Image (spheres, grey):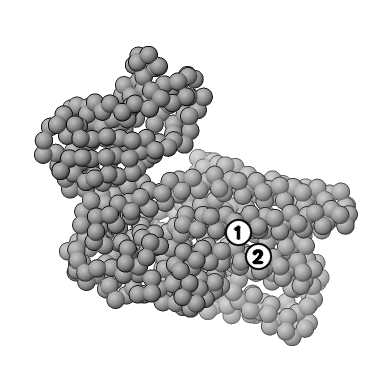
Amino acid sequence: MKLFDSIATKMMHGIFFVLMLMSIFLYKERMFADASYYLFHAINSQWFHVEHGRTVLGLSQVLPIIGTWLHLPLKVVLVLGSLGHEFFYYSVFLVCLYLLKDKKAAAAVIAVHVIGQLSLYWSPMLEICYGAALAVLFYSILQSNKCKDDKWLIFMLVVQWFAMMSHPENFLLIALVLAYHFLQNGWQKRIHLSLGIFTLIGFFIEIVTFSEYEKGHSQFVDDETKATALNLLNGAYLQDVAAVFTNYFFDLLALMAIALAVMASRKRWKEMTLFLASVLFLIVVVNQVKTANEYTRYYESMYNPLVFIVVFFYVYEVLGFSNKFIRSAAMVFLLFIGFFRLGWIYQHGEPLRVRTAQLERLVDYSQSLGGSKYSIDSRNIYYATWANPIESLFYSALDGKEQTVSLVTSSDLEFEKNFKKLKPEQFVFRRFELEPLGFLNEQYFQLDTGNYVELNTATFEKPASEFAKNIAIELISQESLKHGDSTRFLVKIVNGNKEPLPSLVDEKIFISYHWFDEVGGQKVWDGKRTKVEVDVHDSHIQLMTVILPEHEGTFNFVPDLLIEGKEWFNLKESYPLKID
């Protein structure tokens, strides 16, 4: 048994090792949406950035802030920002495992970190998830009786405060933990009364200090989305909710089924009632506030406290079972889910890796033009979000602060008529915020005075047949050569004309391709269309979508341009490719 425990412990450390490696190599992809916003503020001000009173957000900002104080290169600071999230969870894990000697809690910390996180992993500034890990630590201290020591008691109260104030939903987690502790140990006036009062005080402070953002996201009557828990009584709606869980949380459902089965076999009816009531209560609350019957990053976070509830009962009811074989099998299953989730998380991040690569190429192209403020038509960019301007600042400043570029979308400029409000000495931080150039920390960022230059304005000034004489498309790399696949090829568009190759959507110009067999017989003429991203002055590298031939063999791939409904450029470059 000791050998098994040793192997299990090493595997738990192994999961965190993989998570840390991923956080280093995928640090750019993890600067998505809210994560880039908070990280930028922390780096730019060199101090903690917390909003809506959720102080737990500051814990993951410690490493990048220290990096700015030490004047480390921006790349190192950004990597530290990504690592900071893993260090937070790992620190909680280590305290549970070694200081509290609670292997069940250590396993729970891993589970609440990776289970139920697909989109959330790629935007890791997630106070609701941090609160779940801290709730595990809170119970681990509580059930160890270390809280009889004043130092541990103070530490436990600090942990409880951070967990409660991380998100309104997480008050349920603390209440659940206290109720479970009561069921296991009976009424302990000093502990349960004091912690209960502390919870109520925290809840009162949370309510009276609600920001406008929190009020808007926590209202129980939402006429716009028609949210109501009564939707759960609608068969079609309930089926959609069930589909969300079976498709994205099926491992959590398996843990729940196992926990319920073990609890039933042990006749733990009170604990089962608490378990099921907590699950039902949270689902009702979420659906009362929002119509949460589809999978999105936001709803994944709203449902995330369910991960804690299920994992909590699994580890303390199943891993705490007296039967050694069941305990061992339950730990193996939990670790298997942990490693499985790592692969699933990576796979789920594929669109973000494509998005990041495109944004980097667009930043490189903008830098090649000179100047520092550019806008791209929202229709010409993949997966644009409100965070694009912030991410472009990061990606460009990695080349040196003098290379900083603010790349925004047309939607950013059109938002509340920003294009009319903007002054040459301002830039778009987010579409909701226009900031003066002096807002930027000159240690890392530098933008020039001037207006935003559009990257999609050119029109055809001569016939395509004339344009084509000085156009070439070079194949750089391909992602897959499996027959019948839809894949992406990386190509370089080279323009030898004096005039830029247009990319305006209204010009209806696309990159496409033809397939020929080895003897020149035509197999496919009308290939999949891909928009030209920017007006190409000299050259531009971008991805194009390609449908591979249905059969194996060697085929000649001929990339081409066309004006839809009018004419092909009839480019001649041909690339023989072996299709598997």
Left or right: 125 in relation to 518: right
Which quadrant, please, contains the N terminus? bottom right
Is residue 230 something that shows in the picture? no
For the residues bearing labels 2 and 1, Cβ distance under 8 angstroms = yes
Badge number at residue 501: none
Nearer to me, 179 or 393: 393
> Residue 488 at what x, y percent from top left?
41, 36
The residue sitting at the bottom extreme is 150
Type of amino acid at the residue the image marks with label 1? Met
Q: In front of the other: label 2 or label 1?
A: 1
- In this rendering, is residue 506 above or below 33? above
User: Circle 2 is placed at which residue position?
Assistant: 90
| Residue drawn at the location 75% of the way across and 82% of the way down | 190
> What is the C-alpha distance between the residues marked 2 and 1?
10 Å
User: Circle 1 is placed at which residue position?
Assistant: 20
Nearer to me, 356 or 554: 554
Is residue 328 something that shows in the picture? yes
| Number of numbered discs visible in the structure rendering | 2
Type of amino acid at the residue the image marks with label 2? Tyr
* Mark 1 residue element: helix
* Mark 2 residue element: helix
| Residue drawn at the location 31% of the way across and 28% of the way down | 573
| Residue drawn at the location 61% of the way across and 49% of the way down | 342
Residue 84: quarter of image:
bottom right
Is disc 2 surrounded by few (<14), some (14 to 19) or many (20+) residues within 10 Å? many
> Residue 574 at what x, y percent from top left?
34, 26
Nearer to me, 574 or 123: 574
Left or right: 175 in relation to 359: right
> Residue 81 at what x, y percent from top left?
51, 66
Nearer to me, 231 or 311: 311
- In this rendering, is residue 388 above or below 427? above
